[in-house]
Amino acid sequence: MSSLLKTLVELERLKRLERTGWTLRGLPNSTESVGAHSFGVCVTAMLLADECVSRGVKVDLEKTLRIALLHDWSEVRVGDMPRTATSYFGAETRKRAETAAFGDVVDQLGSSSNYKELYQDYEERRSIEARLVKASDVIDLLVEALALERAGHRGLDEFWEVTGQRNFQLDGVPQQVVNEVLDSLMKARTDLQIAPLSR
């Protein structure tokens, strides 16, 4: 089997790998897979980047989409670790594990790929593209939470707490675009008349 095919076969498992955050909150299995989330992040990142470009900001759309596509590849090896796992393992241990797993996934493709560089960019938020993808990661989470709440699920308040921590290392127009989307999400949630977050 070629190294390219081996990578494709391995990454294909992300389509069925559960997003554990929902499962831990009592939602049924198959609520969302990592692959479905990655699709949502890609769509969100593309729309955010296009909106920034339309307002005069230079954004490399191909780079944005590449980062969005690969940002969760490590999970095919380490699984989708929920936020609670970080409190047990520590953020640095988790980051080291995910970086090592990502490296093992892409190493079989040979040294010609720049996937590790893109992954490090995302992890360190070095570029505007990486920062937009991180914002997209959060926005897609909230879009899914909103959809679940519209379907009648409750007890998802903790996912919305990120709206109060909008530090994506963006400024100017990109931060404005992200804030507009987050504000729209919050308004849509308010319109559902869900009890406000406890402070």
Image (cartoon, rainbow, N blue to C red):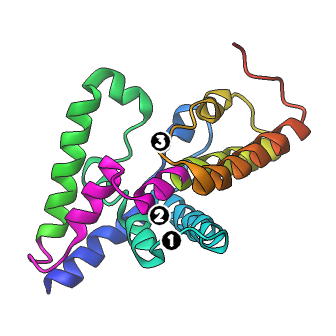
| Side of 150 where 155 appears, left or right | left
Closer to the chain start, of discs 2 and 3, is: 3
Which secondary structure, mark 3?
A: helix
Task: Place residue 74 in its image quadrant.
Answer: bottom left
Residue at 56% x, 67% y: name it. 57
Q: Farthest top residue? A: 199
Q: Residues within 10 Å of mark 3 (few under 14, many from 20)?
A: many
Closer to the chain start, of discs 1 and 3, is: 3
Q: Give percent across and percent down for residue 186.
A: 77, 40
Residue behind mark 1: 58
Residue at 18% x, 41% y: name it. 96
Main SS, magenta residues? helix
Q: Farthest bottom residue? A: 2
Residue behind mark 3: 20
- Label placed on residue 35: 2
Amino acid type for the residue under numbered disc 3:
Thr
Residue 166's place in the image compared with 111, above or below, is above
Which secondary structure, mark 1?
A: loop
Amino acid type for the residue under numbered disc 2:
Gly
Amino acid type for the residue under numbered disc 1:
Lys
Q: In which quadrant is the N terminus drawn?
A: bottom left
Q: Residues within 10 Å of mark 2 (few under 14, many from 20)?
A: many
Mark-to-mark CA distance, 1 and 3: 35 Å
Q: Residues within 10 Å of mark 1 (few under 14, many from 20)?
A: few
Closer to the chain start, of discs 1 and 2, is: 2
Magenta region? 108-135
Q: In which quadrant is the C terminus drawn?
A: top right
Residue 42's place in the image compared with 178, above or below, is below
- Label placed on residue 1: none
Q: Is residue 121 magenta?
A: yes
Badge nearest the viewer, 1 or 3: 1
